[in-house]
Image (tube, grey):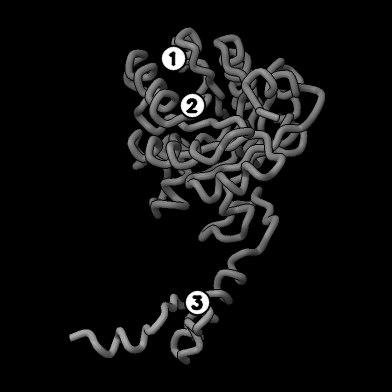
Amino acid sequence: MKNTVTSFMAAKGKEKLSMVTAYDYSTARMVQESPVNAILVGDSLGMVMLGYENTLAVTLEDMLHHCKAVARACRDPLLVCDLPFLSYHISVEDSVRNAGRLLAEGGCEAVKLEGGVEFCQEIRSLTRASIPVMGHLGLTPQSIHAFGGFKVQGKSIAAAQKLLDDARAIQDAGVFSIVLEGIPQALARRISSELAVPTIGIGAGAGCDGQVLVWHDMMGISARKPKFARCFAELAPTFQEALRNFDAAVKSGEFPSSEYCYQVEQEEEIAARIK
């Protein structure tokens, strides 16, 4: 069954929602064959696909490139794409134009942006343009320099109050869902209980309405594994074994054997007679 913004919102209080990142056609095809509710083309691709230290160098063109690839395989999951750094920070007009490109050219069905009350105007403008918006609060990776690194947020009463106020504000501005990242589980549970829209946790505990993980983290192929990332399959050893076996087979001459070669009639004669 096709997952939509409407079905996402209707799941609140009824069933948990699952979301994973994907950045290419092959991964998206595997997610498509699963019951996972949503795919996020995250700007985390800067770190896991492009080798950057953080997400700040990711461009709108990067997001479009990867979103197009994912969209070619994604039919049933809701497809959400991140608005990258500076694509919605400068003006409302830029925000609508850039988000519109992700839908029209990238093929996604919703965009995600980081930030609270300070981005309510952008959220209202996007939803007015019929562009569904997922919010993102807590440890927002585009703000790591302001935070002083990848640190848990909402650890004081004042900081926790700010997150709750931000969640209420962006809900009122029109988001259909909110990612809560890197905050204490009791705070995430409280925010989730206050909102009418579903929350999607990542490092925010089980009290959220759903969970999201980065594909590379959950498959055990990340260079750096966050505390909150449970590995659901240790694929790195399998990949390394396959590479070792391939290397050995090539060097021994065992691969490719005749079963992996093309054969035609009189091929030896043909090969011998050409000049």
Labels in figure, total: 3
Closest to the observer: 34 or 159? 34
Q: Residue at x 32, y 88 (%)?
A: 269
Q: Position of residue 214 (x, y in %)?
A: 58, 46
Q: Is residue 57 above or below residue 107?
A: below
N-term mark: 1 or 2: 2
Mark 3 or 1, closer to the camera: 3
Three-letter amino acid code of the residue under disc 2: Leu
Q: Are marks 1 and 2 in contact (CB under 8 Å)?
A: yes
Residue 165: x and y in percent read 61, 16
Q: At numbered mark 1, what does the secondary structure look like: helix, strand or loop?
A: helix
Instruction: Name the residue: 39% across, 16% down.
Output: 96
The x and y percentages for residue 145 are 41, 39
The residue at the far left in this view is 275
Q: CA distance from mark 1 to mark 2?
A: 10 Å
The residue drawn where x is 55% and y is 37% is 40
- Residue 184 can be seen in this image: no
Q: Which residue is mark 1?
A: 122
Residue 142 appears in the rendering: yes
Horizontal placement of 27 versus 65: left or right? right
Residue at the image point whose x is 41% and y is 23% from the top: 104
Q: Quadrant of residue 180?
A: top right
Q: Nearer the viewer, residue 116 or 129?
A: 129
Figure check: 243 above or below 16: below
47, above or below 17, in the image = below
Distance, label 3 to label 1, CA atoms, is 56 Å
Pointer 2 residue: 113
Q: Residues within 10 Å of mark 1 (few under 14, many from 20)?
A: many
